[in-house]
Amino acid sequence: IEGTNNTSSMTDYFAQAASGTNSDLLDGFTTGLAWETYLIDPDPSSTQNYGYISALSKRGELQSMSINSKGNIGEYLFALGGNYSNKIYLGGSIGIQSVRYIEHSDYVESDPNDSIPDFNQFTYHSDLKTTGSGINFKFGAIIRPVDWMRIGLAVHSPTFMSLHDEYSSFMQSSFNSPDSIRGDGEKVYSPSGSFDYDLTTPFKAIGSLGFVIGKSALINVEYEFVDYSTARMRSDSYMFREENNAIETAYQAVGNIRAGAEYRFGPISFRAGYGLYGSPFRSNQVNADAEASVISGGFGIRNEDFYFDLGFRYYMLEEKYFIYDPSVVTVSEANLKNNYASLIATFGFKF
C-alpha cells in the first residue's frame, strides 16, 4: 500500500491513542515506541493531563505499508459413514486441527520532497506468530429419492480453537533537526509479548441438490449458511468484551452459493464450477460489498486400479483496508484487489 497523505499521519494516531496516559505507562509495542523515538511530543495546549501531539509540523508525507504473511491449517479427520438400502447415506467426523500463522508488517512514512521541516522518515515494524489447535464436528446426510437426484444436508459445528500469540515490534525515526534531543536512526525495540486465548468460529449449515444425467453428466448446486456474528474470543485473563461486541455489531449471517458440473467421456471426466461468497460485513460497514467469487475447472482419469484428478481454482476479492483506525484519526482507505490461483492434484490407488 502506498500513497501521499495530506490530512493525517500515523503519528497523529499514536498521539490520540496515548492521550491521557503518563509517558511512563504508554504501550511498549505502539505509543511507547512513538514516544521513545520522539514521534509524539507533550501537547502544551492540552486541557487534560498527559496530552500529546505529533512531532510533524506539516502533512504531505508518503505513507507505505507492506504485509508479508504465511501459514496453514492442517486437519486430521476421524470419520464414520453408512447407508440404508442405498437410498439414505449418513456420515459424521471429528476434526482435529493444527494452526500456524506468521505475519511481518513494515510501515514507513517519509518526506521524499523535503516538504516537512526537520522530518526525514520513520519505520514501524511488527511481527506476529500464532500457533494452536482446534476441534470440530461434522454431520451429514445424502438422500437419493430417485436414481437421478441427490439431496444433501450437512451441519459443521464451530471449531473450538486454543491459540497462542507471540509478538514484538520496533520503531525507528530520522530527523534532520538541529534539535539534538530528537533521535536519528536508532531503533527502539518493544519487549517480547505473548498471549493465550480461545477462539470459537461460526457454525455452518449446508444444503445441496444434485442431478445425474444419464451415465455421463452430473450437475450440483450447494447453498451454505454461515453466521459470522457468532464468532467469539475468550481468555482467562481478559474478557474480550469490546472485541466480541464489535464482532456481533460489524458481522452478519451470509449465504454462499456454489455450483458445479461434470461430464464423463469414457475414463476421462471434465469439470467446471463457480462459487459466490457474500460479504460477512453488515450494510453499515465499509466492506459491506466485499463479495468473493471463485472460478474452477479441471479433469480426472479413472480406471480399476488408480485415479488422477487435476483442478484449477481462481479466487477474486476486492476490499478496502485502513493502515490505522479511521475512528481515531481520519485516513483514506486503500482499495485492494486480491486475485490468486491454485492448482490441486490428487492421485489414488486401489488395492
Image: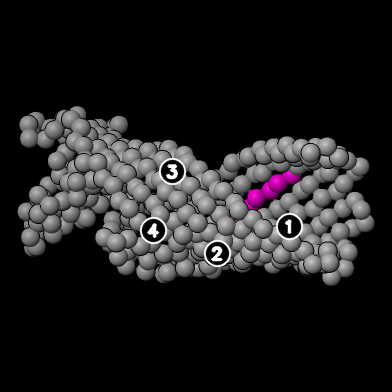
Which of pointers 4 and 1 lies earlier in the amino acid sequence? 4
Residue on which disc 3 sits: 101
For numbered disc 3, what is the local secondary structure? strand
Badge 4 amino acid: Asp
> Label 4 to label 2, Cα distance in Å?
16 Å
Which of pointers 3 and 4 lies earlier in the amino acid sequence? 3
Badge 2 amino acid: Ser
48 or 133: nearer the eye? 133
Residue on which disc 1 sits: 259
Badge 1 amino acid: Ala
Give the main secondary structure, helix, strand or loop, of the magenta stretch.
strand
Q: Which residues are magenta?
A: 291-297
132 or 275: nearer the eye? 132
Which of pointers 4 and 2 lies earlier in the amino acid sequence? 2
Which of pointers 2 and 1 lies earlier in the amino acid sequence? 2
The residue drawn where x is 87% and y is 46% is: 264
> Is 314 left or right of 262, judged from the image as shown?
left
Badge 3 amino acid: Tyr
> Label 3 to label 2, Cα distance in Å?
23 Å
